[in-house]
Image (spheres, grey):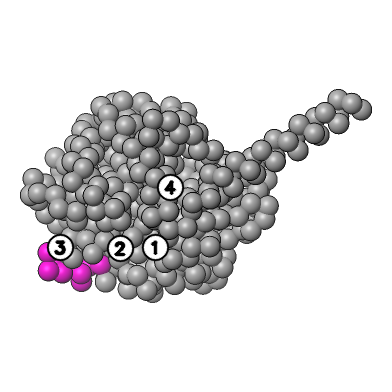
């Protein structure tokens, strides 16, 4: 009996300590200015960890996910950190000059053979050496183009202009040549809509910087999505659709994919993004026992694992909740944003030292730290 009472008291004490910890660590959440110190300290941590040798970055990704996902997680880590650097340069202009230099370093890492490998192994050719060809390579090319768009957004010079032109011309040509206006991430697989949306983001940003060059393509893609690939039940964009098919198709909905689509759409069509975010909240927001977004619309498993979402506990999607911070921030949904960041603190636990901060979970999945920083600083790129 004494042992049981001791265990119960220990559990209660741990819970109380965690509650107090979360309250203390999230007390300044509310505005970019009140969060300045935390945002910049997390930025410092990521710069130290991510800007390394290309193989060093690959090796920092968990080996348990395999070579392909190590590559995917590495490129998401670089592109999300790049986006966060653009965001912070807009929010805190004194960081702009350093951000330009750091994004340049990230672009060079992404252009390395090590970072290209996850894509080239699947397609059997180098994505940059085959820009005149017909294979998709949409995942790799779109993230690289988005990073260059960010580099130009905050005043980067012309060193990547020719490559930027080629990347966007190639994606535009391949997209328009596809019957369904969609490109596969990998051969023989479905189309993953968030991967397509990175390409649309890059084309839209290029158009804003080059007199509307690809606006017609972006609008054509949006019209097709709205006509053929919205869920009849939720109104959300399908997470996965059939390749090369131009009729109605809604293969699946996933919280992690839908949240990311809401974020990417803020770059492409703000009104549509807002509508998608409102629908997403209606069908995927889970308030108990912990607030966050679900991974699955019709079930909430006590525990499961999904390679895109991460460990799912009580139905909550770690990736979906992290990506959901993006549109919450962008659209000023501040009360929900604060609750999401409290959930992040509850799950992640912040540690700080020598002017750097990060969640302990970053030691296992660095990509999550980069995603969360990009999402909590999401602002318009004008």
Tell me the residue at 11%/54% (across/down). Answer: 165
Dot 1: within a 10 Å radius of its alpha carbon, few (fewer than 14), some, or many (20 or more) residues?
A: many
- Mark 1 or 2, nearer chain start: 1
- Residue that badge 1 annotates: 330
Helix, strand or loop status at disc 4:
helix
Q: Position of residue 353 (x, y in %)?
A: 43, 30
- Mark 3 or 1, nearer chain start: 3
- Is 349 situated above or below 270? above
Q: How many circles with numbers are drawn on the protein?
A: 4
Helix, strand or loop status at disc 3:
helix
- Residue that badge 4 annotates: 372
Q: Alpha-carbon distance for marks 3 and 4?
A: 27 Å
Image side of residue 84 versus residue 234, left or right: left
Which numbered marker is on residue 151?
A: none
Q: Which residues are magenta?
A: 210-218
User: Depth-wise, is mark 3 or mark 4 nearer the camera?
Assistant: 4
């Amino acid at each position: 009996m004494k042992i049981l009472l001791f265990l119960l008291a220990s559990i209660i004490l741990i819970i109380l300590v965690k509650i107090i910890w979360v309250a203390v660590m999230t007390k300044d959440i509310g505005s970019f200015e009140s969060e300045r110190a935390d945002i910049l300290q997390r930025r410092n941590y990521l710069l130290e960890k991510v800007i390394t040798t290309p193989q060093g970055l690959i090796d920092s990704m968990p080996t348990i996910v395999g070579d392909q996902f190590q590559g995917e997680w590495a490129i998401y880590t670089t592109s999300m950190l790049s986006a966060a650097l653009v965001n912070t340069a807009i929010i805190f202009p004194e960081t702009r000059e350093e951000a330009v230099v750091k994004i340049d370093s990230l672009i060079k890492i992404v252009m390395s053979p090590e970072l290209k490998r996850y894509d080239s192994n699947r397609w059997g050719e180098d994505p940059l050496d085959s820009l005149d060809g017909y294979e998709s390579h949409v995942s790799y090319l779109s993230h690289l183009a988005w990073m260059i768009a960010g580099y130009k957004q905050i005043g980067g010079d012309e060193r990547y202009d020719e490559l930027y032109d080629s990347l966007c011309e190639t994606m535009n040509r391949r997209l328009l040549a596809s019957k369904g206006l969609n490109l596969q991430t990998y051969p023989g697989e479905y189309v993953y809509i968030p991967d397509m949306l990175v390409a649309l983001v890059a084309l839209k940003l290029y158009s804003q910087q080059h007199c509307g060059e690809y606006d017609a393509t972006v609008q054509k893609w949006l019209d097709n999505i709205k006509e053929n690939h919205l869920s009849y039940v939720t109104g959300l964009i399908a997470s996965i659709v059939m390749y090369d098919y131009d009729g109605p198709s809604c293969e699946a909905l996933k919280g992690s994919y839908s949240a990311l689509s809401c974020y990417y759409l803020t770059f492409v069509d703000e009104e549509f993004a807002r509508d998608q975010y409102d629908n997403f909240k209606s069908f995927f927001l889970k308030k108990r026992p912990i607030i966050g977004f679900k991974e699955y619309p019709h079930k909430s498993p006590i525990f499961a694992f999904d390679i895109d979402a991460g460990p799912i506990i009580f139905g909550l999607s770690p990736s979906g909740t992290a990506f959901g911070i993006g549109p919450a921030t962008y659209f000023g949904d501040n009360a929900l944003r604060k609750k999401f960041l409290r959930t992040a603190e509850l799950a992640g636990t912040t540690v700080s030292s020598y002017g750097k901060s990060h969640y302990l979970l970053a030691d296992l999945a660095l990509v999550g730290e980069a995603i969360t920083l990009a999402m909590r600083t999401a602002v318009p790129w004008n």
